[in-house]
Image: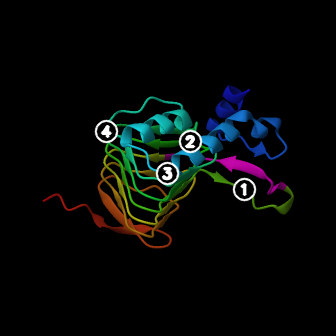
């Protein structure tokens, strides 16, 4: 049943709150792992081991995360090599989050792949869209990446930005909503 819900989420299918799969043991397991991660001191290797259980993938030894970290599902996040995630980040990953190699995420960043329909009578359902963070992206402190966004190779998302549209390769975006500022200095 977990594989079925993951497949449906990856397709962007609307998931209703009454769907029995939302009550699955996987969410409870993730909550337990998050509680363990965010309690006490853990070595980098111990943190990666807990994250492997949350994300359901083996992580490269170059992956680093500073707790606390928050997610409710976890199994829809894919992480490459040399990824760094700073303190206090939140990943709502039911639509799928991909962090390619070399991604650098500042403190307090929120990545949301989940939303709700505008119509009040449908608002209790979940609509998902994937977020893809390409190679060598730097996301500044407190930025928010919204569902369906791809952040291009080498791009920088400035601190506090709210990104609701794709970001081109080798560019800097800032503001609410995030707008193009300039190309990356190649010097």
Tell me the tag on residue 96: 2
Q: Nearer the viewer, residue 19 or 182?
A: 19
Question: Could you say whether the residue bearing mark 4 is in a helix, strand or loop?
Answer: loop
Q: Residues within 10 Å of mark 1 (few under 14, many from 20)?
A: some
Q: How far apart in space, not on screen, are marks 4 and 2 (Cα)?
A: 22 Å
Q: Nearer the viewer, residue 89 or 28?
A: 28
Badge nearest the viewer, 4 or 2: 4
* Mark closer to the chain start, 3 or 4: 3
Q: Position of residue 50 (x, y in %)?
A: 50, 38
Q: How far apart in space, not on screen, are marks 2 and 1 (Cα)?
A: 16 Å
Residue 109 within the segment the image draws in magenta: no
| Residue that label 1 marks | 116
Q: Quadrant of the N terminus?
A: top right
Q: Residues within 10 Å of mark 4 (few under 14, many from 20)?
A: some
Q: How far apart in space, not on screen, are marks 3 and 1 (Cα)?
A: 35 Å
Tell me the tag on residue 62: 4
| Residue that label 3 marks | 40
Q: How far apart in space, not on screen, are marks 3 and 2 (Cα)?
A: 29 Å
Question: Could you say whether the residue bearing mark 3 is in a helix, strand or loop?
Answer: loop
Q: Quadrant of residue 63?
A: top left
Badge nearest the viewer, 3 or 1: 3
Q: Position of residue 141 (x, y in %)?
A: 41, 65
Residue 58 visible (yes or no): yes
């Amino acid at each position: 049943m977990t594989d079925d819900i993951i497949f449906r989420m990856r397709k962007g299918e609307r998931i209703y709150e009454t769907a029995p799969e939302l009550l699955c043991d996987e969410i409870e397991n993730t909550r337990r792992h998050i509680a363990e991660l965010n309690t006490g001191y853990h070595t980098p290797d111990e943190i990666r081991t807990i994250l492997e259980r949350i994300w359901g993938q083996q992580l490269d030894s170059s992956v680093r995360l500073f707790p606390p970290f928050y997610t409710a599902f976890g199994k829809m996040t894919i992480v490459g090599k040399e990824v760094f995630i700073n303190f206090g980040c939140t990943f709502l990953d039911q639509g799928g989050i991909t962090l390619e190699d070399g991604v650098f995420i500042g403190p307090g960043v929120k990545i949301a792949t989940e939303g709700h329909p505008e119509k009040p009578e449908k608002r209790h359902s979940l609509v998902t869209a994937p977020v893809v963070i390409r190679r060598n992206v730097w996301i500044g402190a407190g930025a928010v990446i919204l569902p369906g966004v791809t952040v291009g190779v080498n791009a920088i998302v400035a601190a506090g930005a709210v990104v609701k549209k794709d970001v081109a390769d080798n560019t800097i975006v800032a503001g609410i909503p995030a707008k193009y500022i300039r190309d990356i200095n190649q010097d």
